[in-house]
Amino acid sequence: MARSAHAYVRGSTVHFYEWLESDSGKRVPKGPPVWICGDCHLGNLGPLANAHGLVRIAIRDLDQTVVGNPAHDLIRLGLSLATSIRGSDLPGVTTAIVLEQMVEGYTDALQPRGKRQQHMGAPAAVSRVLEKAFRRRWHHLAEERIEDVTPQIPYGKSFWPLSSIERKEIKKLFEESDVRQLITSLKSRKDDDQLEVLDAAFWVKGCSSLGRMRFSVLVGIGKRKKRKNDGFCLIDIKEAVAAAAPRYSNCDMPKDNAKRVVEGARMLSPYLGQRMLSWRFMNRSVVLRELLPQDLKLEMDQLTRGEAILSARYLAAVVGSAHASQMDVKARNEWRAALKRNYSRKLDAPSWLWSSVVELIARHETAYLEHCRRYAFTTR
């Protein structure tokens, strides 16, 4: 988090939620109740593959998903983009234009398909990541996550040994029919393929995973002698905890946190949701999902002015489409009209969005410098 202001924004979600509870945050217009990401920064968007091998840009992290105010996702994305622009040493004028383009892309996604503006596709900054995702295969994921293509997870900083009880419980888990179906659902696999737990480890991750139970499990698929790229998979088992994101009251939402995450994923990001399973494991609520080589983060720490503007419109449209898919025509029209109100004379974006992002940038910049000061003292 001390590496850059943008990294700090990604890792300090609590400051964003605190601001939403402040007087300024409460002045944000209330949109229709839909599943929202809850933590919609750039790092939580990126290429995702579905079970049939198709790849698209979508929301890729749903730990904080709740039924809530869609304006919160828009503000969080605006803050992330604005911080990335500052880190790219671009002028403040670019930030103003980016917020305008965000609103244009988002509101365009709320329109019926026939009335949406025609786009040339993903901008260069996004296309680069998409092209990389299309080229990736199992060995890329293996080398990235477990350092080697051999069927073994190396212990060290990222992976710790399991206790005998944990190892035993994981083997039992992968004998369950629902877990088997999750793994064999990819198009290249057969329902009756043999599954074998080859290795497993406690997975040490930062930010949202701190203090949570999390395991990485390497599974062999099919007969040992015939295993190649599609003969292995890496399963992430992650404890689901209560969301800190503000939610609407009196909305139908699963009480179990793993079920909440999976339901939110299926509503907002179907490519990911169809590859996830909620479960009770060692008396905790967990989410299982297979990590695919095509699943990547959007790394956009260095942007040109043109890339920032085009990416803002495109990514806001991705979020807008995810929200719009849950609304009927009336709700879409009313929400679109609400977003188009309250424009200032000199800025083609709602005044509440501009003032929200500006205030949040100021808060996070102060908090970031304090964080860096504390970090400097502890690492001397």
Image: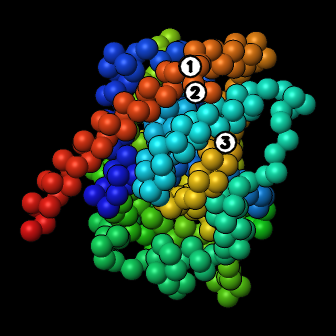
The residue singled out by tag 2 in the image is 347
- Asked if the residue under mark 3 is in contact with the one under mark 1, i.e. CB atoms within 8 Å, the reply is no
Image: 249 above or below 46:
above
Residue at which label 1 appears: 344
Q: Position of residue 346 (x, y in %)?
A: 57, 25
Q: Residue at x 39, y 21 (%)?
A: 25
32 relative position to 127: left or right: left
Q: Position of residue 116 (x, y in %)?
A: 83, 33
Q: Residue at x 46, y 81 (%)?
A: 147
Look at the image and tell me in which quarter the C terminus lies: bottom left
Image color mode: rainbow
325 sits to left or right of 66: right
Pointers 2 and 1 in contact (CB under 8 A)?
yes
Residue topped by disc 3? 313
Residue 199 visible? The answer is yes
Which residue, as the protein is rendered here, is positioned at the far front?
A: 346
Depth order, front residue of 333/4: 4
**Type of the residue with mark 2:** Leu
